């Protein structure tokens, strides 16, 4: 069974750093792109970027370039999303999702990680 | 890349049909046959319901169907069930491993 399991909810202060994770199982993790998607206040879904764990090739949506870092460790089937200095506006739910490349769709999603940034 | 445009809400009584539109441009919806639809219940992750405009993943009821005409894609839910009450988002591939999502539609079963 394909699963993406994300790390738990986080509460941070502005300026702090954070790294959240997404662990895949039940499939050949390195061979599928993994995307990170932001959802603020239960509204729009926004693609932040996508990574190919096999060689860590990463592509960012322009509005997120330089704001976050996406990485992966294929040896432990895990993708990451990190911030070096959080802002209150980073408060959101973050999902990872597997891209089924042949179908250009996101067929499996993690359960989401809620990040709250507040002083 | 601007978000695809969806109506904020749609509704229908049990057993009726509801259709949700998703309007993009000739660079996304109109160019690629890679439109997907996702269902999201409150507090849950999105779930893939339709891919490649018309195809249903295994396990998705055939009450859900997709179509496309020009720059507008549509999702139809026939024979509405109470469990179909959820938010629905469309998405389209826009090249170079990039996608754009729709603004979301809240479907209410009356």
Image (cartoon, rainbow, N blue to C red):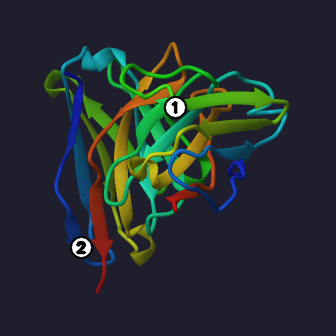
Task: Using the image, tell me which numbered label, if any, was put on residue B99.
Answer: none
Q: Which element is circle 2 on?
A: strand
Horizontal side of A76 relative to B70 (left or right) equals left
Camera-side residue of A79 and A37: A37
Please state the horizontal and vertical placement of residue B90, each as a whole percent of the image: 60, 42
Crowd class of label 1 (few under 14; some 14 to 19; many from 20; radius 10 Å): few
Quarter holding residue B10: bottom right
Q: Is residue B62 left or right of residue A54?
A: right
Residue ID for mark 1: B63
Residue A35 at x, y = what percent?
42, 37
Q: Chain of mark 2?
A: A
Q: Between residues B101 and A78, which one lies in front from this camera angle?
A: B101
Q: Is residue B58 left or right of residue A76?
A: right
Badge 2: few (under 14), some or many (20 or more) residues near its Cα, within 10 Å? some
Q: Is residue A44 visible?
A: yes
Residue B63 drawn above or below residue B8: above
Question: Could you tell me residue B100's position as x and y percent?
Answer: 63, 42
Q: Which residue is mark 2?
A: A12
Q: In the structure shown, which secondary structural element does the residue marked by tag 1 occupy?
A: loop
The chain ID associated with circle 1 is B
Which one is nearer the viewer's eye here, B15 or B41? B15
Question: Residue at horizontal 40%, vertical 45%?
Answer: B46
Structural distance between the alpha carbons of marks 1 and 2: 43 Å
In the image, residue A49 above or below residue A90: above
Q: In the figure, A52 relative to A8: above or below?
A: above
């Amino acid at each position: 069974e394909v699963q993406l399991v994300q790390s738990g909810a986080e509460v941070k202060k502005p300026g702090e750093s954070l790294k959240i994770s997404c662990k895949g199982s039940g499939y050949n993790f390195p061979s599928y792109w993994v995307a990170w998607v932001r959802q603020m206040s239960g509204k729009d879904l926004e693609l932040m970027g996508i990574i190919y764990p096999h060689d860590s090739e990463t592509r960012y949506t322009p509005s997120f370039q330089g704001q976050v870092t996406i990485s992966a460790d294929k040896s432990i089937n895990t993708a990451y999303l990190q911030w070096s200095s959080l802002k209150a506006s980073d408060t959101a739910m973050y999902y990872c999702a597997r891209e089924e490349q042949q179908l250009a769709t996101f067929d499996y999603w993690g359960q989401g990680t809620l990040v709250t940034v507040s002083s | 890349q601007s978000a695809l445009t969806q109506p904020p809400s749609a509704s229908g009584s049990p057993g009726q049909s509801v259709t949700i539109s998703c309007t993009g441009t000739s660079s996304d919806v109109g160019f690629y046959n890679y439109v997907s639809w996702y269902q999201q219940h409150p507090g849950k992750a999105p779930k893939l319901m339709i891919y490649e405009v018309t195809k249903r993943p295994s396990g998705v009821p055939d009450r859900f169907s997709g179509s496309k005409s020009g720059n507008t894609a549509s999702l139809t839910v026939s024979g509405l069930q109470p469990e179909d009450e959820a938010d629905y988002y469309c998405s389209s591939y826009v090249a170079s491993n990039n996608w754009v999502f729709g603004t979301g539609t809240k479907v209410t079963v009356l």
